[in-house]
Structures are given as structure tokens and as C-alpha cells.
């Protein structure tokens, strides 16, 4: 890059980023003072983000409300929701915004040059020239507002962020995270809740909201980031001419101050809500938290990630093991949060009791004291370093673009020191340094200095309180009723007018001129080519192998699939328990902690899962294949170790270890409940589908509500149940893990195939041999229509059905319907007008369809919205431009960039589901050629889904009791 070609900027630093094979540039925009960082490489998945330091002064959630609001229209793009228009009509690979405790970040990504430029343009305009100054309705919709439908009606609060945070504050885990941060940093912005405390959100005024934008959303307080393969000079000059040159440098007081260390560890106790029929015993969270230096210490930043692994996070890690064995809680978790200025190391004991607090602290310090005295387990440190280095080198972040994740990691140092943006993404030297410190006393000294002798800490106890949600709701109702009583008739009528005014604003359609200002690609910009499928059938040592030949940078991705079709319905929950136990229970040759470390020293990890593959060629018969899978990833030369470890787990696990099995069941029960509460939408949708779908029923029996009930029953009556469970687990292992019941999926380059083939014969010899009598699994489905009561203040509302059962058929246009539902009909009615945080729908090749809401203040109203889908579709009228937008948004979901591992997984999924390349081509053509009439025809599909009348809701006790006639059964988990 030539300084002469970017006159608006000063180049401050250049860095050769060997670890991520890229070149880094740090610049400053001369006129506006904007900080700019570039990472140049050959990645076609380009990323842009602009972030701001946004320290909250209170807990009204103004940073979070601002993050939502700036995306609701701007100077050049005045439509009410450009963000949604982009989601519908862009080929983005990432499009979102995130609020953190001290920063707000607006990232976008795309592989298409034109699309990428459009996304940059809309986001820059949104943050610097939002419509929030012209429309107070944006603040009232996204943040909070009074809702009064008639002068004598009930006064209430509504707002997307208000309802989102009501949901977040219903989760004890998020209550704990929040309080830990607030307690450790009382004199800094971290003392406040940047997301917003529902009790304080209604204290935020519109003027304070605008003042926050005026103060912090200026280029002088910004962090601009560009990553990937693009003309960087052209992008910089565009940013300068279109936006940055219009601002003069100012001083923005946004630095995050250091919290002065405490003289001694402080203690804090507070309540969280549980449902009226949940126990208070064994339901307390104990947490031990210490502040660890600053995130500007390159070695410390990574060293404590290694220590978190070795001390706490790995199965069998000493803190986890000691607390579990002492009976102090049933699920031991922890974290090392290094995404803030002063990182925090935490140990959390879940399902404990408040009177165990002193024993909890004593046990942690006793174990750590012994480790400091006797020395760390060097194998655990080696495994922790390899675990993190493997992930760093592989740079596989699943569906998230790696450029996005690098950009967020850069802010872990750049936000606090303008001169240190690269210290954490250039990590190879740090890994080498940390390897050399094993056995030198370095890690023991870190434990002593930063944990045992560090007074800057907090012991936080979060205790259950029955009836708390109902009490708080009652107090809020009384407060709002009293507020209404204070209002004159004129003031009430004014509130009614404002409520209606907001509804009118929400329902008012944008003018075609405003919508057309948002750039849209053309159908011709989209390739008609499908992503290649890599499936080559082979037989190795008598085992069917599907080989996916893909360049993987020397890593082999191996998946052993064992057929579950001979497992009876009654035994399926035990397959779930078996899957949860393998890999974290002792084996013949290893303690489970040693086993985990041995695996992570040599490989990228081994994991098990239960997978389900519907046969799309036998939809009427509802045919599918369920598999028990064990997966690993390893460098080719380490494949012998990976195979040996997989065989050890499958055939040598001590499934008779009563004590360890109880610990696993208790942990499993805790994690399942946590998932039900935080991802209730997926739980509710699966449960609703399980009323009629055998494949969904199997998923529910092995990982859903039904599975949870079996796990709870066994854990609760362990002495009576354990013998039967152990017999079933041992029998299932012998039934499943046989060579004649196995197939292999392998992703690698050709050279990695020979290495794999050498190992298969040895594996066959180790697997179980005894023939096992099995029958066909018959799954019985039953429609229950359940309402599950929780202590939450919001709902997850699901309605499901099978449209093929009702005579409708699958077409590619159903993929477009998902986009139209999620960002048009459901979005407008459930999120914008209803105040829910999210809404989704899905329709698949085997006829399963559902509608579901996320953190939704309503229940009955949402069900009414679902009922309106067929009529909406029959009257669906859209311009060619808008139709094109929906199509592009649909293709964007399908054409996400894939890592080598993801390409192999996709190919194997298609193979197992019997989806041919011809079917994929046909679906793509149906999407690209779709018009208004094709969408109208889907009214029959929606009607068919609704006709099944399968309903499941997870939510507040009060709301579910209010609407109990809607359900066949009202219960709790």
C-alpha cells in the first residue's frame, strides 16, 4: 500500500502476521481521528466493521438500545428497517451488531464485491447519520415505551430491548455473569449493565438516548476494520470521501479506567427466580472470581486460557474433580473472560446450596495451594496449549467468518491501547513461549500471584427464590397502575394517541423511493451453480467409507458412524446417556482426565454425537437413519493416536463406574435445563414436532424434554435405577460398536487417505464382535400440546405440523418463505409490533414445518399471528425488485462459505439423506425462478402446518396458566 495514494490517512504501523498468513496495517484518518486497521490476505470472505467505545454510565441499556436503533433508517437510507432489507436482499455471509460491556460493534461480511460495498455504505450511514433524531418512534419501538390502548385500560411497558432483557434476566447464568462484573468493577463502567436492566430501562429518556449518540458515535471514537482480499486503497479513499472527511477530530472521553484493586475479597448474595414447583434446595450458584491483570499482557491473556483448561474446563481437571467429589454442586463450570480490560477468572458451582459457600472457597484454595506446592500436571498444560494452538492454526469458527473473529479479538487489546492492536492475533511466538514455561514454575507462580494471593476478587452467591417473578410482576403492575392514577384524563388520552401513533408508524409502509435507495443485487449476479459435492464410495477392510477429497492443510477429519436402527424406543434415552458419558469416564488404560489430555496433546479433539438423517426418497414412510457418531480431527501423522483413542473410548470405557455415572447424570440434567431456558425456541419447536414425527420423537428421546425426564428420574432414584442403567449401557455399547454396524466418513486430501486406510483394519479388530439380536425401532408419537411453566418473564411459542401428511409438497420456494416469514410477516407482527426479540420458521424436504417465537412477551396474540399466515400468503403482492430481494436473501443463506470440515460434513449429510445433486439443482432453479404466484401457492403449505394443531410453549407460569385451555397438558420440566 502506498502512502501517496491514501492522502487522508497516516500509516502508523505495519505487521507481518505470519500466524494468520496476512499483512496488517494500522492507520489514523487525519481529519476525523478515526482509528483504522487493515488485514490483507487472499480470503474472499471480506469483512468490514465499525465499532465505538461505549462505556455505560447507568443500567438503562442505552448502548444496547442504540445498537438496535441506528439500524432503523438513516440519511441516505431512510426506510424504517434497512437492516432487515439487507438481510432479505444481500449475499452477506455475516450481518449483525453486538453490544458488549464497553463497546458496540457493527460487522458485515460478504464474498461478493458489489454486495460488500453496499453493506459498508448502509452501515456507515446508519451509525453516523441515523434517523433517531427524526423519529422518536424508533426509540420507543426498540427501547421502551408506555403502552395504553384506551384511557381506562391497563398501562404496560413494551419494547424489543426491554423484552429481550426481561428474558436475559430470567436466566440465573446471565444474572450471575452480570453481578460478577458489576461487583468486581464498582468504580468503572463495568459496574453498569450495558444491555439494560429491565427495572432501569424505563428510566432512560429520549434526550439522554440522543445525547449518548452525539457523544460516542463520532469517528474520533471509532475503530474501523477491513479484512480480506480487496483493493484496500480504493476502500479507504471511499470511506474518506463519503464519510470521514465530513468530521473534524474531537476529544471523546470514553477511556475505560482501571479498577483499583480491592483490599480484600468481597462477598455478594442476590436472588433469582424459580417456578413455584421448582425446588430451592440444590439450586444455588456459588462463584469464585478473581481479576487477572489486564488484556494488554500478551502472555497472560493466553496463559490463563491454558490454565482455565488445565485447572477447570477439561473433564477431570483438578478443581472440577475436587468440587464434584466433595459434593459442592453438581455441575462445575468456569470461564476466563479476556474480552474486557481487566480479565476475570471464574469458578462456578451450580446446583449447590448457600451454606456450602465457605467449603466451596476453602476447597478451591486448598486444591490450588497443593498444585502450587507440588507443581502442575505437565501433560494437562501440554494438552491445553495444543488444544488452543490447533484451533488457532485451523481457524475454523463454524458459520462465523474468521475475519470477523479476528476483528473482535483485535479489539481485546486495541480498545485499551491504540498502539497494540496485533498482540493477540499474532500468537505463534506466545504459544512457543508458553510451551517453554512448562516445568519452570511459571504457571504455579501465576496461580499464586493472580488467584491465591490476589485480594481483587469476589465471592458471588445467586440463590433461588420461589414466587419472585410473580412478586416482581405484581409490584410492576401496581407501580404502573399508580402511575396511571397520577395521570390526568388528557395525559391518558395523550398516551393512547402515542400508542396508536407508534402502531401507525410500525404499520406504515415505506415509500418505493425510500426502499429503492437500499442497494440490491440482480438475479443475474447470482450463480446458478451449486456448491460441489465430494462423495466417493470406497470399501476399506470390509468397512464402507465415504471419502471427501478436499485440501485440508494436512488435517484429517474422521467420523465413525454406528447404525442405531436396532435400538428399541425404550432404550433410546440410554443411548443419550451413553453418548454423554463416553470420553468423560475412566477407561481401562486411562483416568478420564488423563484420557482427555492424551487426546488433546495429539489431536484437535474427539467428540461424540447422535445424528439423524431423514431419507428424502421415502418421505411418505417417514424413513430415516439414526447414528451414534464419534469424530476426531488430527494431522495425518497423528491419525494412529486418534484411532487408538477412539477405540479406547468405544470399547474400554468403564460403564460400571456408579459414582462417575451419577456425576455425569447430574451435570447432564443441569446443562439440559440451562439449554431449555436459554434456547427455549428450539426445545419448543422440537417437542411440538415430536407429537407426530418419529424422527423428532427420537431426537426428543435422546436430547430433548423426554430425555431430560429420564435423566432426572434416574438421578433422583439412583440407588434403585443404577443397576438397570449400567446393564443397558454395557449392552448398548456391545450392540452399537461393532465393525459390521459401522461406516466411515473421511475428509482429507488424497495423501491423507492412505494414512487413514492403514488404521481401519486395526480398529475393526478392537471393536465388539458378539452378534447381537436387534429388531426394528418402532417410535410411538402422541399429540400432547404442552405448556411448560418456568420462572421466565417471556415465552417461546411454537406451532408445528407436517405439510406432506396433509397433501402439500416440498418446493424450493419454501426456502424463500423462511426469509419472508422471518423478516417480513412474523418480523413485523411478532417483533416490531409485539416486542418479541425474535421469530423463526422452517420447512424441510420431509414435510416438517414450524413457526416459533423467541423471548416473546405474548402467547395468545402470537398464536393468532401464526393463524394469519395463510391469508397473508394468499394476498401476497410484491414488486419484481422485492421478489429479487427475497431470492437473494435465500441464496445468501444457502451459499455460506465453508471450511474444509464443513464441506465434508455437507457432502456426507447429502449422501446420508439421499439428496442427489439433481435435487439440489432443481431446488436452486425453483428459488431463482420463483415469482409472486409461487409464494401465494405456499398458503396451502402454511395451512397444512397449522391444521396439525401441534402446540408447545415454554414460558412464564402466569401466562401459561392464563391460557391453559390452549393446552392438553400444563406441566414443568
Image (spheres, helix red, strand yellow):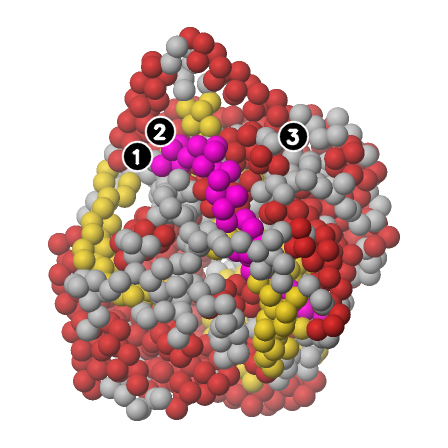
Structural distance between the alpha carbons of marks 1 and 2:
9 Å
Mark 1 surroundings within 10 Å by alpha-carbon count, few (fewer than 14), some (14 through 19), many (20 or more): many
- In the picture of the structure, the residue carrying the numbered disc 1 is 469
Residue 447 seen anywhere in this rendered image of the structure: yes
Which residue occupies 83% across, 54% down? 525
Task: Give x and y (percent) for residue 601.
Answer: 43, 84
- Residue visible at 42% across and 87% down in the picture: 433
Q: In this picture, is 364 found above or below 500?
A: below
In magenta stretch: residue 211: yes
Closest to the observer, 965 or 8:
8
| Residue 867 falls in image quadrant | top right
Q: Quadrant of residue 955?
A: top left
Q: Within the magenta stretch, is there residue 470?
A: no
Please name the residue shown 27% across and 65% down the image: 290
- Mark-to-mark CA distance, 3 and 2: 27 Å
Quadrant into which the N terminus falls: bottom right
Which range is magenta? 200-229
Tag 2's secondary structure?
Answer: helix
- Label 2: how many Cα within 10 Å (few below 14, some 14–19, many 20+): some
Eye-nearest disc, 1 or 2: 1
> Does residue 286 lie above or below 448 as drawn?
above
- Give the crowd class for mark 3: few <14, some 14-19, many >=20 residues within 10 Å: some
Cβ–Cβ under 8 Å for marks 3 and 2: no
Q: Secondary structure at mark 1?
A: helix
Numbered circle sitting on residue 958: 2
Percent coordinates x, y for residue 862 in the rendering: 53, 29
Residue located beneath label 3 in the image: 869
Q: Earlier in the sequence, mark 1 or mark 3?
A: 1
Is 758 located above or below residue 479 in the figure? below
Label 1 – label 3 distance at C-alpha: 33 Å
Disc 3 is placed on an element classified as helix
The reply, left or right, for residue 903 in relation to residue 937 is left
Amino acid at each position: 500500500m502506498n502512502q501517496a495514494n491514501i492522502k487522508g490517512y497516516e500509516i502508523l504501523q505495519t505487521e507481518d502476521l505470519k500466524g494468520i498468513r496476512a499483512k496488517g496495517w494500522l492507520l489514523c484518518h487525519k481529519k476525523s481521528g478515526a482509528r483504522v486497521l487493515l488485514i490483507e490476505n487472499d480470503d474472499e470472505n471480506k469483512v468490514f466493521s465499525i465499532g465505538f467505545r461505549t462505556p455505560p454510565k447507568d443500567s438503562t441499556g442505552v448502548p444496547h438500545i442504540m445498537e438496535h436503533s441506528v439500524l432503523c433508517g438513516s440519511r441516505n437510507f431512510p426506510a424504517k428497517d434497512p437492516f432487515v432489507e439487507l438481510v432479505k436482499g444481500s449475499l452477506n455471509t455475516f450481518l449483525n451488531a453486538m453490544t458488549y460491556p464497553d463497546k458496540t460493534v457493527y460487522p458485515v461480511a460478504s464474498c461478493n464485491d458489489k454486495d460488500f460495498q453496499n453493506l459498508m455504505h448502509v452501515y456507515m450511514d446508519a451509525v453516523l447519520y441515523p434517523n433517531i433524531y427524526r423519529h422518536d418512534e424508533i426509540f420507543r419501538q426498540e427501547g421502551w415505551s408506555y403502552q395504553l390502548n384506551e384511557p381506562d385500560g391497563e398501562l404496560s411497558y413494551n419494547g424489543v430491548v426491554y423484552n429481550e432483557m426481561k428474558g436475559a434476566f430470567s436466566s440465573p447464568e446471565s444474572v450471575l455473569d452480570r453481578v460478577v462484573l458489576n461487583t468486581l468493577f464498582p468504580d468503572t463502567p463495568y459496574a453498569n449493565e450495558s444491555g439494560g436492566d429491565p427495572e432501569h430501562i424505563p428510566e432512560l429518556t429520549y434526550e439522554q438516548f440522543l445525547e449518548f449518540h452525539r457523544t460516542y458515535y463520532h469517528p474520533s471514537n471509532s475503530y474501523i476494520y477491513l479484512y480480506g482480499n480487496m483493493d484496500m486503497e480504493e476502500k479507504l479513499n471511499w470511506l474518506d470521501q463519503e464519510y470521514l472527511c465530513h468530521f473534524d477530530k474531537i476529544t471523546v472521553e470514553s477511556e475505560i479506567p482501571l479498577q483499583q484493586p480491592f483490599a480484600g475479597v468481597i462477598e455478594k448474595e442476590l436472588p433469582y427466580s424459580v417456578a413455584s414447583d421448582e425446588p430451592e434446595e440444590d439450586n444455588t450458584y456459588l462463584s469464585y472470581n478473581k481479576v487477572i491483570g489486564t488484556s494488554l499482557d500478551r502472555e497472560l491473556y493466553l496463559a490463563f486460557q491454558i490454565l482455565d483448561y488445565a485447572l477447570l474446563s477439561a473433564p477431570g481437571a483438578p478443581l472440577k474433580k475436587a468440587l464434584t467429589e466433595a459434593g459442592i454442586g453438581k455441575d462445575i463450570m468456569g470461564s476466563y473472560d479476556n474480552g474486557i480490560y481487566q480479565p476475570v477468572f471464574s469458578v462456578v458451582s451450580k446446583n449447590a446450596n448457600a451454606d456450602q459457600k465457605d467449603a466451596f472457597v476453602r476447597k478451591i484454595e486448598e486444591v490450588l495451594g497443593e498444585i502450587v506446592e507440588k507443581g502442575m500436571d505437565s501433560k494437562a498444560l501440554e494438552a491445553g496449549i495444543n488444544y488452543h494452538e490447533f484451533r488457532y492454526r485451523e481457524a475454523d469458527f463454524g458459520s462465523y467468518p474468521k475475519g470477523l473473529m479476528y476483528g473482535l479479538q483485535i479489539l481485546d487489546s486495541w480498545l485499551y491501547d491504540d498502539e497494540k492492536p496485533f498482540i493477540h492475533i499474532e500468537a505463534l511466538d506466545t504459544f512457543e513461549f508458553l510451551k517453554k514455561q512448562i516445568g519452570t514454575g511459571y504457571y504455579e507462580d501465576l496461580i499464586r500471584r493472580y488467584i491465591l494471593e490476589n485480594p481483587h476478587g469476589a465471592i458471588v452467591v445467586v440463590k433461588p427464590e420461589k414466587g419472585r417473578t410473580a412478586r416482581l410482576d405484581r409490584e410492576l403492575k401496581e407501580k404502573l397502575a399508580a402511575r396511571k392514577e397520577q395521570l390526568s384524563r388528557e395525559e391518558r388520552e395523550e398516551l393512547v394517541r402515542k400508542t396508536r401513533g407508534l402502531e401507525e408508524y410500525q404499520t406504515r409502509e415505506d415509500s418505493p423511493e425510500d426502499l429503492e435507495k437500499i442497494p440490491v443485487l440482480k438475479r443475474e449476479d447470482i450463480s446458478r451453480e451449486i456448491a460441489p459435492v465430494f462423495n466417493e464410495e470406497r470399501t476399506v477392510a470390509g468397512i464402507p467409507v465415504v471419502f471427501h477429497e478436499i485440501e485440508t492443510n494436512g488435517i484429517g477429519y474422521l467420523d465413525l458412524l454406528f447404525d442405531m436402527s436396532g435400538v428399541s424406543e425404550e432404550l433410546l434415552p440410554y443411548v443419550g446417556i451413553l453418548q454423554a458419558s463416553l470420553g468423560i469416564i475412566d477407561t481401562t488404560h486411562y483416568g478420564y482426565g488423563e484420557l482427555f489430555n492424551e487426546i488433546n496433546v495429539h489431536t484437535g479433539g474427539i467428540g461424540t454425537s447422535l445424528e439423524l438423517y431423514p431419507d428424502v426418497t421415502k418421505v411418505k414412510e417417514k424413513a430415516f437413519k439414526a447414528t451414534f457418531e464419534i469424530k476426531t480431527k488430527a494431522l495425518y501423522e497423528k491419525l494412529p493416536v486418534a484411532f487408538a483413542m477412539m477405540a479406547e473410548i468405544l470399547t474400554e470405557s468403564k460403564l460400571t463406574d456408579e459414582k462417575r455415572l451419577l456425576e455425569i447424570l447430574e451435570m447432564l440434567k443441569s446443562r439440559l435445563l440451562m439449554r431449555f431456558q436459554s434456547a427455549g425456541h428450539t426445545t419448543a419447536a422440537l417437542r411440538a414436532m415430536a407429537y407426530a414425527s418419529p424422527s423428532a420423537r427420537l431426537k426428543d428421546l435422546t436430547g430433548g424434554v423426554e430425555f431430560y425426564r429420564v435423566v432426572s428420574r434416574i438421578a433422583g432414584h439412583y440407588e434403585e435405577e443404577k443397576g438397570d442403567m449400567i446393564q443397558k449401557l454395557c449392552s448398548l455399547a456391545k450392540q452399537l460398536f461393532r465393525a459390521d454396524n459401522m461406516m466411515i466418513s473421511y475428509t482429507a486430501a488424497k495423501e491423507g487417505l492412505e494414512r487413514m486406510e492403514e488404521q481401519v483394519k486395526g480398529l475393526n479388530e478392537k471393536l465388539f464382535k458378539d452378534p447381537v439380536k436387534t429388531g426394528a425401532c418402532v417410535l410411538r408419537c402422541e399429540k400432547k400440546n404442552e405448556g411448560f411453566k418456568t420462572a421466565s418473564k417471556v415465552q417461546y411459542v411454537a406451532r408445528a405440523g407436517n405439510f406432506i401428511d396433509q397433501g402439500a409438497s416440498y418446493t424450493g420456494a419454501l426456502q424463500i418463505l423462511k426469509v419472508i416469514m422471518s423478516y417480513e410477516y412474523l418480523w413485523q407482527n411478532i417483533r416490531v409490533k409485539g416486542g418479541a426479540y425474535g421469530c423463526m420458521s422452517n420447512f424441510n424436504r420431509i414435510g416438517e414445518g414450524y413457526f416459533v417465537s423467541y423471548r416473546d412477551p405474548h402467547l395468545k396474540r402470537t398464536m393468532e399471528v401464526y393463524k394469519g399466515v395463510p391469508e397473508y400468503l394468499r394476498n401476497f403482492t410484491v414488486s419484481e425488485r422485492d421478489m429479487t430481494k427475497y431470492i437473494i436473501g435465500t441464496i445468501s443463506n444457502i451459499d455460506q462459505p465453508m471450511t474444509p470440515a464443513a464441506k465434508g460434513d455437507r457432502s456426507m449429510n447429502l449422501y446420508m439423506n439421499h439428496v442427489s445433486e439433481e435435487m439440489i439443482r432443481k431446488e436452486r432453479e425453483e428459488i431463482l425462478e420463483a415469482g409472486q404466484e409461487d409464494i401465494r401457492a405456499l398458503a396451502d403449505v402454511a395451512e397444512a402446518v397449522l391444521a396439525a394443531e401441534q402446540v408447545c410453549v415454554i414460558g412464564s407460569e402466569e401466562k401459561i396458566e392464563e391460557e391453559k385451555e390452549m393446552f392438553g397438558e400444563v406441566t414443568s420440566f
